[in-house]
Amino acid sequence: MSPRSHAASRILLPALTGAVVIALWYGIHFYLTPEMRFLLPTPAAILDAFREHRAVLASATWNTAQGALLGFGLALVVSSVLALLLSLSPLVRTSLYPYLMALQMTPLPVLAPICVIWVGAGLNSVALLTFVIAFFPLVVNTTQGLISTDRNLVELFALYRASRWQQLLRLRVPAALPYFFTGLRIAATIAPIGAVVADMNAGSSAGGGGGLGFQAVIYAAQAKYPALFATALTTCALGFVLNAAVLTLAWLTLRHWHDAYERRDR
Amino acid sequence: MAAAPLVEFRGVTKRFGDGPVVLDRITFSAQPGDFVSLIGPSGCGKSTALRLLAGLSPVTEGELTVAGRTPDAAAAELAYVFQEPTLLPWLTVAHNVDLPQRLRGVPAAARAATTRRVLELVRLGDKAAAYPRQLSGGQKMRVSIARALALEPRLLLLDEPFGALDEMTREHLNEELLAIRGAAAWTAFFVTHSVAEAVFLSNRILILASQPGRIHHEVAVPLPYPRTDDTRLSREYLDLVAGVSRLLRSVPAVPAAARS
């Protein structure tokens, strides 16, 4: 397959799948008896819901995005510092890992009320909870990267009497980047999900109003099912955007040297 | 009168912790300009000898000097070419060559000029902006050699640098190495498994025996430099290769019980 037809098929094939899915969707909708059709609103009905609720959905999206980005950013900073600390010695790792694991093992809906009593419902809690779940894959992967430096390269730096600082900045950190981006991709996938779940459990309509999770709870309670589906699609889109941003950043950073980005048509 | 030796082993013994003796009372000295090849069975301590010279590992007993100092104090006099190209994949060829100079605090302007010069020397001037993954195995090794030469070492340590390359590339790089050397007569210690390569490159060959690692035989290679492709066809060269091969075969086999 030539590169051009390959690129074309990358757009064409998913578009084709999309068309089949929509056709099936309508098929199922009209197969259902009229009184059961609320179970699966048609794409047209969902589009209508988007139009009708666009102001609410836009503000909910903005609130959730804020929480997700704040938590994600905080996780990024804290995990990088902690990974550097953990990479110093196996002793530090053995001492701290069980507690990091414990934090990760506690389900978010259980942590949510604790966050609420600490920092109040709303954005603070959503950001804090997002931080908790995005933090773990980042710290684990970055630490792994920092301690997996090629032994030969470490030897090279020892040979030329590099200082610890030079070894860290010129060798360990760049060598850890592929691992870091693996963690970042996982974090970018779960951060929006975390933010929405956090919002369902610790969201608040006070101030700027609730986020997407909060809104989903309300639409479900009000039996506004097309709007509920529209909310689901919006959370999905938010996840895609954050993922695309991280993938682009990884590509820009690693494309020249990492094997995962090697051009196949060479 | 002979010049002061650049490298001197005086009864050098090396063992790791309580393990077996890796090198046993090695006594040997190399003059400036010597090209010394170390050849011998696996586990004879060839690579360990280079690591001692580089100050990467301490001598257990005896005395080892480089330019009259301990290897650690003489670190600035030497450069090392590893078995693998050992390039940083995220740096361009030029930045890889630049790196050890930078670590040693060479000013930027001088570094740029040196990097250009050594890359020309290994005929990779046009690859300065390429990344290692875009190069062939032989080209990567040439970058690795250029990186070592950029430090203008008096002593160059090469640990089986061409072992992973095919025969054609290896022979080609052997010739290139000697041609480059014509320009700056560094002293070389070269570890290899190839008798032909050892004879072609060196003026002295140390045949080592293993367990414990010790000098089994030293062979002088009187072939005149410069050596070229034609050298490989000469009677003298072929006789030397046969002679060294025989000596290598006479290295006593390690008793099965002593093998780990």
Image: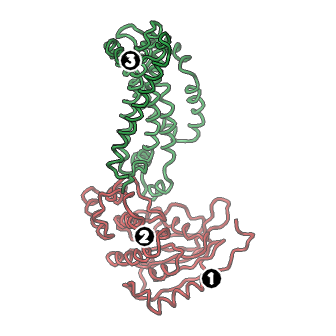
Question: What amino acid is at disc 1?
Answer: Arg
The colour with which the image depicts chain A is green
Q: State whether residue A167 appears in this view.
A: no
The subunit carrying tag 1 is B
Residue at coordinates 48% horizontally, 22% vertically from top-left?
A28
Q: CA distance from mark 3 to mark 2?
A: 73 Å
Few, some or many C-alpha atoms within 10 Å of disc 1 (few <14, some 14-19, many ≥20)?
Answer: few
Measured as percent of width and height from the top left, residue A235 is found at: 41, 22
SS of the residue under disc 3: helix
Q: Which mark is residue B82?
A: none
- Residue at the limit of the structure toward the right, as seen here: B257
Q: Quadrant of residue B14?
A: bottom right
Measured as percent of width and height from the top left, residue A10 is found at: 37, 41
Which residue carries the number 3 mark? Answer: A46
From the image, state whether disc 1 or disc 2 is nearer to you.
1
Question: What amino acid is at disc 3?
Answer: Ile
The colour with which the image depicts chain B is red
Q: Quadrant of residue A55?
A: top left
Q: CA distance from mark 1 to mark 2?
A: 28 Å
Question: What amino acid is at disc 2?
Answer: Leu
Q: Which mark is residue B249?
A: 1
